[in-house]
Each structure stands twice: as structure tokens, then as C-alpha cells.
Image (spheres, rainbow, N blue to C red):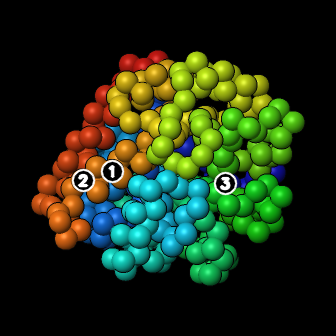
Amino acid sequence: MSAADSGRFSRRFAALKAAGRGGLITFITAGDPDYESSKQIVFGLPEAGADVIELGMPFSDPMADGPSVQAASLRALAAGMKLARVLEMVREFRARDDDTPIVLMGYYNPIYSYGVDRFLAEARESGVDGLIVVDLPPEEDQELCLPALKAGLNFIRLATPTTDDQRLPTVLSNTSGFVYYVSVMGITGTKSATEGAVKAAVERLRRHTDLPIGVGFGIKTPENVRAVASVANAAVVGSAIIDRIAGGLDGNGRPKPDLAAGVLGYVRELAAGVRGSGGK
């Protein structure tokens, strides 16, 4: 039995269902391109229309991520971003927003180096709601997943087009909060799936779980968001937002004055895609 507190997730997805629409889940790498610029973006995401926020924990070898997210991690690390500062950013966010769910997404190495028990205690205390750790399969649940659930944090698992009906119960066994369906195989930000393929995949997942389903990879436009959110509980956008951050840097890699405003304007456009989407 999971001890995770799914309160913010439950409330948010219930509110979306009551509103008759799907949600928008946004991903950015914490500390990209620097702490203050990143914080300004994160603080503005809920007002811009983000229903759930995923914060990437910068890592030097993000093997499952495409060029955009890899570059974001390197920018954040070069600016001095550490895991402790990711947690501090969440703490600062919670001082002004106690409703929007926050997921930390990344790899096990930084957590292991930080200390699992210390990380879980501080993540819970700072106001983190869930974790996505892409390089820990269910067979390694004792490493982080089970301790996270015991600490009251949701552990959100990825399902992919190759996760067949025989494998799905294992993948979903300790999953909580929501399920993240990776709609295409490969690294982030490079391809996108057809609407029909996403619909069929979501229907198959729903035969195995009652958890909300968010669908990501390759979603870039309000039209993409609307199409996905009409069949799933939420659309996840990451690389396209990070590309806007990269586009807001000057020739020396420093943020232009309008960087945050430009990124948040783009998120508002995406959020318009889920209003009236009739999400499931």
C-alpha cells in the first residue's frame, strides 16, 4: 500500500475533470539559464496556464533526453545549479503557491550522491509532490521508489509504446500521482506521435489503471496540446519550452531582458489549447 500523499494531484485532476478539459503539464530544467531567470519562469507558470509543473534536476549525462534538454542541463550546471538549490526553488515557490503540483524529474545519480534519505526528507519538506526518475526500472524499486512512497512522495512511472500488456502491471504496480505516457520511442523533443496512436495507447493504459494519464514527447503547438488533451488527462510540453528559453539568450548565453515574458507568453498560447479540449 502506498503511503504517498496524492492530494495536490488528486485535487488538480479532479478540478480539470470538473472543468471538462485536459491539463497542461510543463517541463523546464531548474536553474536554466540561471537561478533567477528560472525562478521567474517557474513562478509565472501557473498564471500562464500550467496545471502541473515538472522541474528537471540538472545532470551532466541526461541520456534519455534530446539536445534541447541536454543543453538546458549544461547551462544550469554551468550557472552553479545544484540539487539543494532545486529544492530551495520549490520551497520559494510553495511560499506563494500551495496548489500547483510539482514533480522533480531526472536521474538517480544526483539523488544517490545527495543521499536518498536526506533527499526524500527535504523534497517532502520543500513541497515536492512527486518524482520521475527515468533510469530506475521497477525491478529497482527498493532503491528509491518504495522509500519515496513511504516518505509521502508520489512515484510517477513512464510507459512507452513498447510497454506491452504483460509488462504494464509491473510498471504500474507502485506508480502514483499520474502515469506519464511517452508517445514515441527515442530521446525527448525529436518526434511526435499521431493522434490516432495516442488515442489507442491511452485507451489501452486505461484498461490497466485508474490513474490520470499525461502524454508527452514532440508536443509543440496549441493544436498538438488540444489533440492530446482531448483523449488524455493532460499534455506534457518540455523541449519546445526549453527551446524558447534558449531563444531568449544573447550571443554570450546570457538571458535577454524579455526572456521570461517570452517563455510565459508561449505557455499561455499552449494553455489556450487545453481550454475547451474536453479532456477525459
* CA distance separating discs 2 and 1: 6 Å
Hey, what amino acid is under mark 2?
A: Gly
Q: Are marks 2 and 1 in contact (CB under 8 Å)?
A: yes
- Label 2 residue SS: helix
Q: Are marks 3 and 2 in contact (CB under 8 Å)?
A: no
Circle 3 SS class: strand
Q: Left or right: 11 with respect to 51? A: right
Mark sitting earlier along the chain (3/2): 3
Q: At 67% across and 48% down in the image, what residue appears?
A: 157
In this picture, residue 185 sits left or right of residue 149: left
- The earlier-in-sequence mark between 3 and 1 is 3
- Residue located beneath label 2 in the image: 247
Location of mark 3 (residue) = 155
**Which residue matches tag 1?**
243
Image quadrant where residue 9 sits: top right
Disc 3 to disc 1, C-alpha distance: 27 Å
Q: Is 168 located above or below residue 250 in the figure?
A: above
